[in-house]
Amino acid sequence: TVAARTVGLTKAYGDGEARVTALDDVSVELQQGEFTAIMGPSGSGKSTLMHCLAALDTPTSGEVYLGDEALGRLGDKRLTQLRRDRIGFVFQAFNLVPTLTAQENILLPLSIAGRKPDAAWFDEVIDTVGLRPRLGHRPSELSGGQQQRVACARALVSRPEVIFADEPTGNLDSTSGEEILRFLRHSVESLGQTIVMVTHDPVAAGFTDRVVFLADGRVIDEMRDPTAERVL
Ligand code: ADP
Ligand code: ADP
């Protein structure tokens, strides 16, 4: 099944002379349980594609679907709910609340949504990220890799249909980065999570199932079962 897709997605910023076409007629499908990397030079449209897929930005033309729901038909209130309930985000900057413990950070999106965590699922996520001994620590007491694992757990705990990760290893040394990638891989394999990751790093791309290459706002290539060597 298709977790999300774009059909003829075009996004332009500005008007007249200043008009920039960030995405030009992009159609991509994300299969459920698939780990996709989006790669391409700076300015090729990676962030714009991810923002449109995640309902953070609206297309100039074309359509974005989450499951079989066309986002263009939803009002602002429904879109806010959809981002909150059906999508997870992991950023380069971990974006944790410094005054909250790891556990409180992980549960924050559910608390905001007024939802109760499923205890068995919470345990599974915590064991998958290996954070049990750190649950009572605040972000300042955790390493960068541990903070990013908290951010990943926070994204996973509400069982989103898709997790969007924007350069999740960008602020990490290579050892911590690979730890996060192994964890994301594991959540795809054992939890069936669908993940889309923007990355510049061939090593990171090697952990995915598929790489979509962008240039000048278009999909120029795709690679299945990538390895770091083939992406380089
Ligand atoms: P990437 O993530 O691959 O670096 P982006 O999606 O950020 O690419 O940007 C694609 C193009 O759109 C670039 O030319 C960028 O300058 C332009 N762009 C992105 N966001 C905006 C914006 N908010 N306003 C104007 N131009 C933008
Ligand atoms: P990246 O390439 O890592 O996505 P950028 O520095 O290109 O980072 O973009 C950071 C943010 O600034 C993005 O949210 C993008 O939408 C916005 N942006 C990028 N280019 C422009 C631009 N020319 N004008 C206004 N905003 C832009």
Image (cartoon, grey):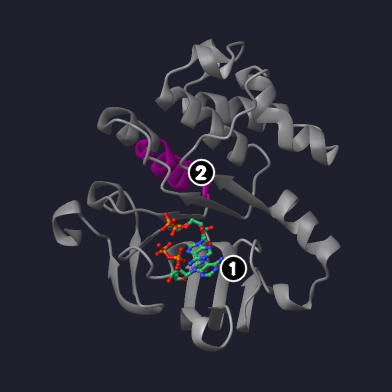
Helix, strand or loop for disc 2: loop
Check the image and report above or below for 4 versus 134.
below
Q: CA distance from mark 2 to mark 1?
A: 16 Å
Where residue 17 appears, as percent x and y from the top left, is 50, 87
Quarter location, residue 209: bottom left
**Is 185 contained in the magenta span?**
yes
Q: Is residue 6 above or below residue 1?
A: below
Nearer to me, 156 or 48: 48
Provide the residue designation for mark 1: 52
- Residue 204 screen position, x and y as percent: 30, 47
Q: Quadrant of the N terminus?
A: bottom right
The amino acid sitting under disc 1 is Cys
Residue 106 in the figure: left or right of residue 183: right
In the image, residue 232 above or below residue 131: below
Magenta segment boundaries in residue numbering: 181-193
Query: Which residue position is annotated with label 2?
Result: 91
Does label 2 or label 1 sit earlier along the sequence? 1
Q: Quadrant of residue 208?
A: bottom left
Is residue 188 visible to the viewer in this orientation of the structure?
A: yes
Q: Picture coordinates of residue 89 (x, y %)? A: 58, 47
Depth check: give the residue in front, 64 or 91.
91
Q: Main secondary structure of the magenta part?
A: helix
Label 2 sits on what residue type? Phe
State the residue at coordinates (49%, 26%): 147
10 with respect to 110 (left or right) = left
Residue drawn at point x = 38 percent, y = 67 percent: 43
Does any atom of ligand 2 lie closer than 8 Å to the CB of label 2?
no
Q: How many marks?
A: 2
Q: Nearer the viewer, residue 88 or 24?
A: 24
Q: Position of residue 12 (x, y in %)?
A: 55, 80
Answer whether residue 5 is magenta in the image. no
> Horizontal placement of 232 versus 3: left or right?
left
